[in-house]
Structures are given as C-alpha cells and as structure tokens.
Image (spheres, helix red, strand yellow):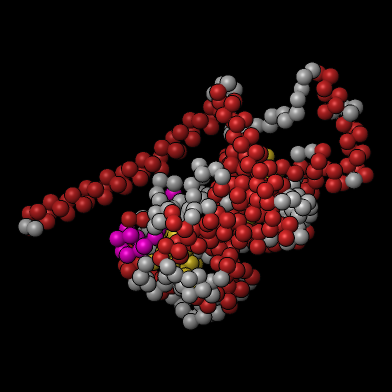
Amino acid sequence: MSFKNEKLHSKSNKSNKKNTLQKLLKSIQKPAVLARKLHPFYKGKIEVVPKCKIKSFDDFSIWYSPGVAAVCLDIHKNPELIYQYTNKGNSVAVISDGTRVLGLGDIGAGASLPVMEGKALLYKYLGGVDAYPLCLDTKSEKEIIQTVKILQPSFGGVNLEDISSPKCFNILNTLKKECTIPVWHDDQQGTALVILAGFINALKVVGKKIDKVKIAMIGAGAANVRTADFLIQYGANPKNLIIADIKGTLSKSRKDLKDQKELWRLCLETNSENINGTIEEAMENADAVIALSAPGPDVIKKEWIKSMAKNAIIFACANPIPEIYPWVAKSAGAAIVATGRSDFPNQVNNSLGFPGLFRGVLDVCANSITNDMCITAAKELAACISSSKIKPDKILPAMNEWEIFPKIAAAVGIKAIKEKVAGIDISYEKLFNKAKETIKRSRAITENMIKKRLIK
C-alpha cells in the first residue's frame, strides 16, 4: 500500500469510527426522546384492573360488603387462606429509596418512580406478576427495614431496587432473616444470576473450566459482590478472583475496608497472591473480566485486554456505555464480549432472570429466596440455549424468547420445594404449565387492550 493509500485508509478508519460513535449516540438519545414524549401521554406505565367478573352492581355485595366479611373471618381463623382468597400470592412490592437509580445516583424517591413503574411493567408482561412501585421518602436503613416488615400482609414478595451500597447489604440480610415472605435485591441477586448464566455458556465456548479460570472483577458494588458469591458457589476458586474498586484491588492489605463486612470478607477470601494494584494489574493473565463499574468507554483499556490469557471473556456491563466497546475488546483479542446493551450482542439483562424466578417463588408460596434457588435459575437460563447453538455472539437468550420464563419458574419452584421453603408441593409439569398460562394470559390482556384501543 502506498503512503497516499495508507493516508486514505487511515482517514477511512477514522470516518468509520466517527460514524459508529454517532450511531451509538443516536441509539442512546432516541429512547430518551421517546420516553419524554410517551410518559406524559400515558401518564405512567401500569394501572390496576379487575380480575373478577362484574355483571351488575349487585356483584359488589360479594366482592365488598357485606359478603367480603365472611372471607375476612375465614382468613382470621386460618391465615394461610389469604393466598387462596386474595391476590397476595401474585403481588410483589418494588421498593426503593432512590439513592442509586440506574447510573444516575441519588436522585430521590420521587424521581425513581418511573424506573420502579418500569420494573413493575416487566414483572407483569414477562412473568405475569402484579408488582407495585413503592418509593420511600427516607434514606434510613432502619426505616426501610421496618417499612418492608409492616407491609408483609399485603404482598407475596418484595423486590428491593436501586438502594445504595453498603446499606443495601444489611437491609437485604436483615429482611431475609426477619420476614416471612421472600425478599430479593435485584441489583445484587438478579444481576449476579444473569451474569452467572452467561458466564456458564461463555466458558463452554472457550473450553475452560470454572474452577481453573482467573477472573478479574472490576467494581466492588452490590452487583459484583453478589456475583463473586454466586461464581464461588457455582465452583469458581475464590483464590482465583481478583476484585478491584476505585482505590485498587481488594486484598488483605485493604484495611480501609475492615468496617465494610461484605467487602472485607472478600478481601480475606479472594486474591490469594495478594496483588496490590490497579485494574490493569488485576487483569494481567486473567481468563475473564466481569466489569460492573463506571460507564465507559475507556474504563478498560485495549492494552489491558492484550495482557490477558488467550480466548479472554469480557463482561463490560456498565450502562449506557460499557467500560469498553465490544469491537475494541475483540480487536484486542477477546473471544467473547457481553454488555448491558440490547443493541450489542450478548446483552446481560436482569430482565432475563427476575420475572421467571419470582413466578416460580410465588407459585409455590415460598417464604424465602435462597442462593441455591438463584443458582438453579442461572443454570436453567443458561440451559435455555442448547450447547450446539451457543456461539461467541449468542451466550444468552433474548427477552422475546418468552418460554425461558416458565422454564425458570418451574425449576426455581421445584428447588424451593426441595429446600423446604415452599408452602405447597407441586410437580414440575404442573408448575411449568401454570407459569406458562399465567404469562400467556398477562400478554394476551395487554395485546387485547391494544387491539380494542383501550391502550392507545
């Protein structure tokens, strides 16, 4: 190639990169523009509609006074009847204090409501679960815990959402111990579940074993802490995990973390070589990177990926811009790249996990969600793609592959029964069919309302 052609080639590359970045910017901006138009048009995303027949006004004597008094007395005598007589068994409270909303930070409870409504929408459409956004005007750990506890009679489960670290750890751990209904923090367990599922299939592609790989984890927030726990429970060697936060790698030398129980535990359990350094040192010779940190694109450098082991796996999950763009990571030698973006291959999205998991939890009237139930959900999600169809750019199903949700539901429900945290005993086949019909009904309601112009 002549010098002139080289210059033209260089200009062409720069032009292509510029065009790509412009497209990316538009892809980020377009949903925001539409969101600002459509939210006021619909005035929110969810509403309450009847699920019982109302043929005449006389029916209110059954659904309300005086007939309902008999039902109340039955529940008073036998509290378990609440699951048969009310919607408690299909109701989830989505609770947030607005202190860590998406990538926006502490924007307050009111500003978090659109996100919590969106979460409720996903619960209903993907899992057939009735979810109710409850944004709390408090940042007090004690007040959040107390509020959840006194709400228990009305809900079959609780989804904690967008609560800042480190208080989110104690809130979840306390509520799991003190509540009689399942409590779940999606930023912890939901993220970790889906990442584990993708990681299981990514390892199959590159032909590596979970107990042998060295994993660098970038970011030490709620999501990566729980991801580390799930990886270890699934079979990863904790000695081969190196976690890095904004100050450097977690190790026994990080005395500044002694007061943070969850992080100090990982300081003691992981990083057997006691590597003290930055993200760059954490990634050297690593087989995989799982990044849940700050939006990129230059949080992870191309040169650092070049220092990794052959056939490296990169999970760059920051939103809206991943820690490194997929094509940059690939050009540096990465075999598989996953992000949180739907417009890139291998989207790692919590929505693949929580709707099916909670469907199963509610259908067996479980009183808790154990780590084993989460691992079961991850394995089932991974198994939704047969080994012959897993590819470098297809390690997880997409949300529109709707049968993943009843499959996860049934698997989780059976695991809850085996773990003796379920209120009823039911077969896999019945659980699967029940979940399938509930989800189909939920989607059909929305589709019929759109057809009849009840939703404009």
Q: Position of residue 103 (x, y in %)?
A: 50, 51
Q: Nearer the viewer, residue 135 or 175?
A: 175
400 sits to left or right of 117: left
Residue at figure coordinates x 44%, y 38% from the top left: 31
Q: Position of residue 320 (x, y in %)?
A: 44, 49
| Quadrant housing the N terminus | bottom left
321 sits to left or right of 15: right
Query: Could you say which quadrant of the image residue 61 lies in?
Result: top right
Query: Could you say which quadrant of the image residue 174 lies in?
Result: bottom right
Bounds of the magenta span? Answer: 328-341
Residue at figure coordinates x 55%, y 74% from the top left: 238
Magenta stretch containing residue 331, yes or no? Answer: yes
Residue at figure coordinates x 53%, y 65% from the top left: 220
Residue 416 position (above or below residue 400): below
Magenta stretch containing residue 214, yes or no? Answer: no
Residue at figure coordinates x 54%, y 75% from the top left: 237
Q: Position of residue 291 (x, y in %)?
A: 46, 62
